[in-house]
Amino acid sequence: MPPIATDNLLTDTDADSQSLELKIAPAPLRLVQFFVNTRANYIDHEDLEEPEDLARWLKDQGVAGKGISVTESDLRWAVEVREALRALLMAKGLGEEDPVGMTFRFDQHGSSAVVPVAEGVDGALGRILAVAFGADPEMWRRLKVCANPECRWAFYDRSKNRSGTWCAMAECGNVMKGRAYRKRRRAAAAAREDLWKTHGPPRALG
């Protein structure tokens, strides 16, 4: 996909109507987004089913060399890391504190960095995590997961006040708003029935 300009934020209305393609995070943070989205809950699709799938993805993203070897254990670990990142984005979206802490090392010039030292799959996953924890704070706050519990697709919120909630309003937004409306209607109907059982149905005036 072509790179997306990072200096233009959309209005809330535009953000609601934008396509999923426009909700791609700026580089290098999009690496984290793409990794989380190797699992698409909404359509029950998994990109990382086999060790070969993980090896191919890591090479395609440029975080591992061509000769990387991936085992079943590596695959399970990668999926655990991915879902931990998804949970981190979800907790952040709910206003909770990040469930993990990081310590940065500063050089003599005051610059800081998170650099993985491991090789193989651990090193490749470390590079993804380094992007997450070394990201610009404003960009990191804008990387979220969809509020639809059946989706949880990672998206980049370009609204001016970071108010984006859904990966796409036309799909998840309308679905969740419709569910909330129907839930309120059912609750109101149940309350009305309870009232009628206690006091009887309302009588017509006159």
Image (cartoon, rainbow, N blue to C red):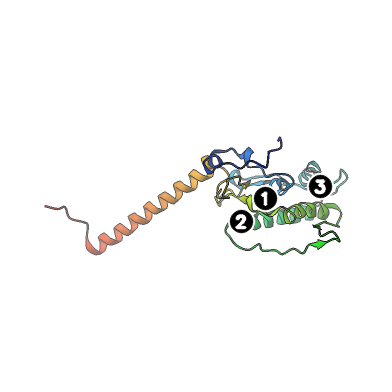
Circle 3 is placed at which residue position?
A: 63
Tell me the kind of residue under disc 2: Met
Examine the rendered structure and indicate whether residue 79 appears above or below residue 18: below
The label on residue 139 is: 1
The amino acid marked with disc number 1 is Met
Q: In this view, does 154 lie above or below 91?
A: above
The answer to whether residue 101 is visible is yes
- For label 2, the SS is helix
Residue 72 appearing in the image: no
The residue that mark 2 highlights is 90
Q: In this view, does 113 lie to the left or right of 92?
A: right
Q: Distance between the residues labelled 1 and 2?
A: 15 Å
Residue 90 at what x, y percent from top left?
Answer: 61, 56
Label 1 or label 2, whichever comes before in sequence order:
2
Residue 28 location (% of width, % of height)? 74, 46
Residue 17 in the image, given as x and y percentages of width and height: 54, 38
Mark 2, Cα crowd under 10 Å, few <14 / some 14-19 / many 20+, is: many
Residue placed at 68% from the left, 39% from the top? 5
Query: Dot 1 surroundings within 10 Å: few (below 14), some, or many (20 or more)?
Result: some
Could you say which is closer to the camera, residue 121 or residue 133?
133
What amino acid type should be assigned to the residue bearing mark 3? Val
Residue 66, relative to residue 203: is it above or below? above
The answer to whether the residues at label 1 and label 3 have Cβ atoms under 8 Å apart is: no
Marks 3 and 2 sit apart, C-alpha to C-alpha, by 25 Å
Q: Residue at (61%, 50%) from the top-left corner? A: 145
What is the x, y in percent for residue 128? 76, 51
Q: Given the current orientation, which residue lies at the most extreme left position? A: 206
Q: Of the residues tagged 1 and 2, which is closer to the observer?
A: 1
Helix, strand, or loop for circle 3?
A: loop
Cα distance between the residues tagged 1 and 3: 21 Å
The residue that appears at 34% across and 55% down in the rendered structure is 188
Rendered-image quadrant of the N terminus: top right
